[in-house]
Image (cartoon, rainbow, N blue to C red):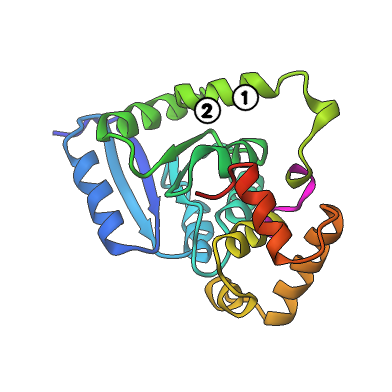
Amino acid sequence: MKSKNAIRVLIADDHAIVREGLKQILADTKDIVVAGYAENGSDAIRLSRDDSCDVLLLDISMPDRSGIDVLKLVRKESPKIAILMLSMHREDQYAIRSLKAGAAGYLNKQSAPAELVNAIRQVASGRKYVSTALAQELANQIGDDHNIPLHETLSDREYQTLIMIASGKTVSDIAAELTLSVKTISMYRSRLLLKMKLRHNAELTHYAIKNRLVD
């Protein structure tokens, strides 16, 4: 039986099998209840306005808009909601960017169920949640602001475009996946190449691999 003061969680993920898996994990807890589901970023934003959740589990890769965009908007409109980012991406790709944008924590989808439950409880209590590996990465960055990597100067969309190109996707592929025009993605590509002083996709991919931004 669930507690009367159970933590209310909204799950935002476009994959039904992931939503169901998360629901099953949380069903075994007495102090956490699933308050609703969102299949895309727009639904997540709309449902978060209803004051029906304490924690938003937000996938970073949504079909209609990026999780970072959704994060920023929900933080602005519903600052009391703790947002825990979920992703298949390695922590060193998006975690720090998510935390800087206002996330209460970042968790890889491959994490153990017990870690998910612990993370939800921690962010619901007003604390931040980071894994041991991410805590070390954050510690390594302290005092290094004078030597910021070039990819840290990119906007969220430019960074997302960088990762996707380096992963072998074409501009057309990226446009289709993010539901944006080819012209818009081409603009992001041009900007990031200029900011990073790179000439073409081959140099971009080499940079991403060298800096361990992609596998």
> Residue shown at 23%/55% (left/top)?
20
Res 169 quadrant in image: bottom right
Secondary structure of the residue carrying tag 2 is helix
**Tag 2: residue type?**
Leu
Q: Position of residue 168 (x, y in %)?
A: 55, 66
Res. 189 mark: none
How many numbered marks appear? 2
Give 69 or 33, whichever is nearer the viewer.
69
- What crowding class fits label 1: few (fewer than 14 Cα within 10 Å), some (14-19), or many (20 or more)? some
Q: Are marks 2 and 1 in contact (CB under 8 Å)?
A: yes
- Vertical side of 12 occupied by 120: above or below: above
Please identify the quadrant where the N terminus is shown.
top left
Query: For the stretch drawn in magenta, what is the main secondary structure?
Result: helix
Residue 54 in sight here: no
Whether residue 58 is situated above or below residue 170 in the rendered picture: above
Q: Is residue 168 magenta?
A: no
Q: Amino acid at mark 1?
A: Leu
Residue 42 lies, in percent from the top left, at: 53, 65
Residue 140 picture location, percent across and down: 65, 21
Q: Is residue 208 left or right of residue 45?
A: right
Expressed as whole percent of the image width and height from the top left, the position of residue 123 reads: 46, 29
Residue assigned mark 1: 138
Q: Give yes or no for residue 154 being in the magenta stretch.
A: yes
Residue name at image x 49 percent, y 68 percent: 63
What is the spatial separation of the Cα atoms under label 2 and label 1, in whole angstroms? 6 Å
Can you identify the residue that label 2 sits on? 134
Q: Residues within 10 Å of mark 2 (few under 14, many from 20)?
A: some
What range of the chain is rendered magenta? Answer: 152-157
User: Do we see residue 176 in this rendering?
Assistant: yes
Specify whether 8 is left or right of 103. left
Q: Looking at the image, which residue is at 81% across and 58% down?
A: 198
In which quarter of the view is residue 4 placed?
A: top left
